[in-house]
Image (spheres, coloured by chain):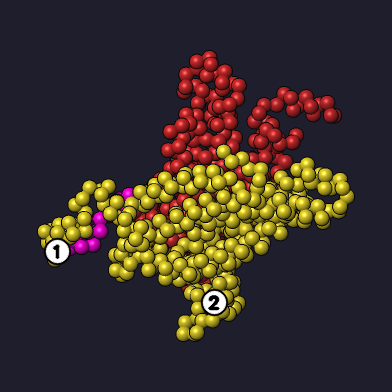
Chain colours: A yellow, B red
Amino acid sequence: MGKYILKRILIAIPVLIGITIIDYVIMCIAGSPLEMLQGPRVSEAAVEAKAIAMGLDQPIYVQYFVWLSQLLQGNMGYSIRSYQPVSSMIAEHLGPTLLLMGVSLVVSLLIAIPAGIYSAVHQYSKGDYAVVTFSFLGSSIPSFFLALLLIYIFTVKLGVLPSSGMTTLGSEGGFMDVARHMIMPVLVLAFSLAGSNIRYIRSAVLEILQQDYLRTAKAKGIGRFKVIYKHALRNALVPIVTVIGMQIPMLFGGAVIIEQVFSWPGLGLMTMSAITARDYPVIMGVCLLSAVVVLLANLVTDIVYAVVDPTISLD
Amino acid sequence: MKKRNKADITSESYLQTVFRRFKRHKLAMGSLIVVILLGGAALFAPVIAPYHPDEIVGTFSGAPSMEHLLGTDQIGRDVLSRLLYATRISLLVGIMATLISTVVGVILGLIAGYFGGVADMIIMRFTDMVMSFPYILLVLVAAAIFKPGLWSIILILGFVDWPGIARLVRGNVLNLRETNFIKGNIVAGMPLRHILFSEILPNTVAPILVYATSVLALSMLDEAALSFLGMGVQPPTASLGNMLNGAESLTVLTKQPWLWIPAGVVIVVLVMAINFIGDALRDALDPNSKS
């Protein structure tokens, strides 16, 4: 077990280094930070002097190591637009995004786990078809279209829910206000997540229901309820752990679009405005952060999986 | 009766078997018809579209009428004609992006799976790296760097989508390499190209095909999202995503639903139909499935 965990961590390290290299290369392709300096009033000599001051005259791999050592000290560079440090910009916007992602993940699991189990237990019944169709709808509807539909219904027609922001302007905010602003974004994110989750959980439970030990449990005559809830569910929890791990990159991606539509003041909205303004240090900072989070999430999932499931082969 | 059925099955070709199994899925058969109809309408858009998609032919933001079945947009272009051309563009983006990512994924997967060792290590770690970046973020960054447009969108989606296929092919090749018929080929001294492309590849086509349908559905969704955000297909060329772009304005959203609801519905219907077909294909192509 210890050996397996060690091996997974050792594999993750080159991937992590590779991620920083890709990130740096993309940033270099995207353009030199000197471009914004150029203009009729800036002489070429001044640009050159600035380039030397910024270390841009060094070979690219030296620049990479300088950048990396800065990164390790927590310095992710500065925004081209606001001159704020990228790390503090990210820290400022991280909270709302984590709140949105966390609640959406929980809601999607609250929908997907019962629906997936129901549909597996009642395989090929009308209810099963309804659940599967619902899950296909969830993964086929573009999140921004669903968001627009919800805004159309709940904000425009019924006027019951706010369509943008995290708190009402001018008000204190408070728990209820934030919750009201969260309903629609969470619904949209949870709906699309539940779409894939349901099918995953359904097939996981189906597989478990065919196992010999469940046939034994049924043959003992302990009743359907106990068979499903005591024997099947406990084993179905293992694949559910991986579902949560798989969702992290999806959540990050989904948040970008959803936050844009609902003007949710999180990382996604910040990234989108950085992208339209071509503020590359900010964009790449967010990319790097999310790639590292995804990598860590995968690592933790693999380790938890190995701990929970004793039958997994550890080679 | 029973006997005749059996005789039918033994004499049928592989494709007939697949189609017979596929037909059992009523939703998928319906989806196939929907895709053929929508695809046909998109393909023949120049013939069936009532107006030119980029020409101003009516009043500004006119409501649906007999002349313009789905109304006209903000600058007086016919929405139905634009919708037909948009479906054409969105399908083109989806299909081309899927083709590119499938080719890249298959080649990398074949190399990693068959040769193993260092090549496998490098390719799989690179796959891990690409997969670690949140997909949409990577696409958005690429769209910000390169000039947005039809072909850059196709290339971006194509070159970001391949890791899943590469992993799938690699896994299949690893299994196949251990089978006796491949070992026999190696012992017989068959050329490498023959083993890879005539022996191994045909045996992994089924799962690749199933996976490709989901990539197709995903890349159509991504094209829509990108174009909606203004980073994808650029106007005046209509795509299903950029037709929805107008709904960010409050007047369009509240007062002119014909400008954004039809495009959204077409995306949902198309993507859902493709997903249903993929699901039925998975079952029909699975050699272990019953009957």
Q: Amino acid at mark 2?
A: Val
Mark 2 and mark 1: Cα distance apart in space: 47 Å
Residue visible at 56% across and 63% down in the picture = A189
In this view, the residue farthest toward the top is B188
A182, A90: nearer the viewer: A90
Residue visible at 25% across and 49% down in the picture = A62
A273, A93: nearer the viewer: A93
Residue A219 x %, y %: 86, 45
Q: Chain of mark 2?
A: A
Say which element carries label 2.
helix
- The N terminus of chain A appears in which quarter of the rendering? top right
B239, B189: nearer the viewer: B189
> Would residue A115 be counted in the magenta stretch?
no
Q: Which residue is mark 1?
A: A42
Residue visible at 64% across and 40% down in the picture = B282
Instruction: State which region is magenta.
Output: A25-39
Q: Chain of mark 1?
A: A
Residue visible at 86% across and 52% down in the picture = A222
Q: Which residue is mark 2?
A: A178
Residue A156 x %, y %: 55, 75
Ranked by sequence position, the earlier of labels 2 and 1 is 1
Q: Which mark is residue B234?
A: none
Q: Amino acid at mark 1?
A: Val
Q: Is residue A297 visible?
A: yes
B168, B221: nearer the viewer: B168
> Would residue A32 be counted in the magenta stretch?
yes
Q: Is residue B173 above or below residue A73?
A: above
Mark 2 crowd level (few <14, some 14–19, many ≥20, 10 Å Cα): some
Residue A132 x %, y %: 68, 53
Mark 1 crowd level (few <14, some 14–19, many ≥20, 10 Å Cα): few
Say which element carries label 1.
loop
